[in-house]
Image: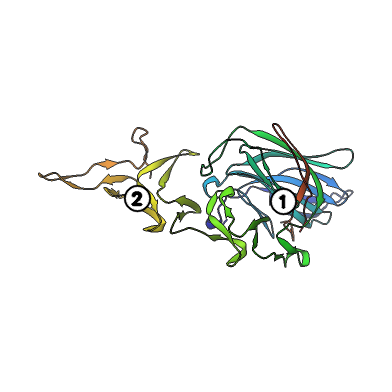
Amino acid sequence: RDPARGGAPPATSCLAKFHRTSGKPVWGSAVPRVHSFVPHDAGVTLVGSAFGPADFDAVTAAGPVGWVEGYDMVWLAEVTTEGRGTYVQTVASDRSYAAGCALAADAAGDLFAAFYTTSSVTRLGPGPPGGWEMDLGLDICGPDEVPCEGDTRLTVVRLGAEATPSCVETCGDAGQDTIVAPDTCYIDGVCYDAGGTGAFLGAPCWACDPAASQREWTEAGVGTDFCFLEGVCHPAGGPRPIPVGRWGSVDSECEVCSPGDDARGWTVTDGFVLADDGANCTAAATDLGGGTGEAEQSAGSEDAGINVGSIVGIVVGVFVVAAVLVIVAVGRAKKREKC
């Protein structure tokens, strides 16, 4: 994966069809991690997850990047009996993860998907009319807090009819010539109005700028409000985070984001110089009247003693949810979408 787009290396499953009598393979494809699937007359509906955006042969389904790179997202997709992808839908949680997904059908043939999230807001699909945003109205974190994690809550949705995303005027031939509506963007299967950002996914310095691109993110505020380093948007004045263990980090005592000085690198604060190892900080030499002295200082916590040294021709669209059940809230969905 391109580091500029964020996300972690994908986990892969193999989706295959075998002949019912001979047992020989008919077709097969590598897809993102599959958790469960339900065969039906039109083909197979699948649900799975990915660490960050989910890459298929022809499309990408939006997922966590930047500050929440490597967090889970859930995807829903349909494949025809010939192995052709029909649509993919994203389920993403605000600056957090959606995971633990499963799929089932009732006696009437209705499909139900389940997953859990930890933030108050979850987006299912590309937005209205089919996709929608579910907000539980919980005071879990502030608007700039990343990651945004509270208690785990289970959501169950019933999948409904198909519809075209609101920002798509036409899908063209098999979705390859999609025409996006003016003043909107259609990025990784999700609709955004002009000026909308990727903050929900963990990248506040990415924005929808239809004049630049309607299918890709455009940098916004980099050089003024943000630094952009290794796929992460860092706010002006923010310290360099130094990894500790698998998930933790500590703040550097001498390196910060200073967009006016260097929007693509860290800036050493006054009174310090960067040590030869490129990570630890050394106090700048000071004239004490009888000579000079230097004191080396860790960039992290001194007490902690840290030494920092293919589904063919998949088309993005949406399954839209017809009903949703949450442990603490009930919402109503509209239609699923197809493009």
- The answer to whether residue 8 is seen in the rendering is no
Which image quadrant for residue 313? bottom right
Q: Position of residue 306 (x, y in %)?
A: 37, 38
Of 169 and 16, the residue lying toward us: 169
Which image quadrant for residue 155? top right
Q: Position of residue 75 (x, y in %)?
A: 70, 47
Rendered position, 60 above or below 139: below
Labels 1 & 2 near each other (Cβ < 8 A): no
Of 131 and 277, the residue lying toward us: 131
| Tally of marks | 2
Residue 172 is marked as none
Rendered position, 290 above or below 4: above
Which quadrant holds the N terminus?
A: bottom right
Q: Is residue 56 left or right of residue 17?
A: left
Q: Is residue 63 left or right of residue 36?
A: left
- The answer to whether residue 124 is seen in the rendering is yes
Name the secondary structure under disc 2.
loop
Name the secondary structure under disc 1.
strand
Q: Amino acid at mark 1?
A: Gln
Badge 2: residue crowd in 10 Å (few <14, some 14–19, many ≥20):
few
Q: Amino acid at mark 2?
A: Gly
**Residue pointed to by mark 1:** 89
Q: Position of residue 300 (x, y in %)?
A: 37, 40
Of 21 and 263, the residue lying toward us: 263
Badge 1: residue crowd in 10 Å (few <14, some 14–19, many ≥20):
many
Q: Earlier in the sequence, mark 1 or mark 2?
A: 1
Q: Position of residue 174 (x, y in %)?
A: 77, 64
Residue 278 is marked as 2
Which quadrant holds the C terminus?
A: bottom right
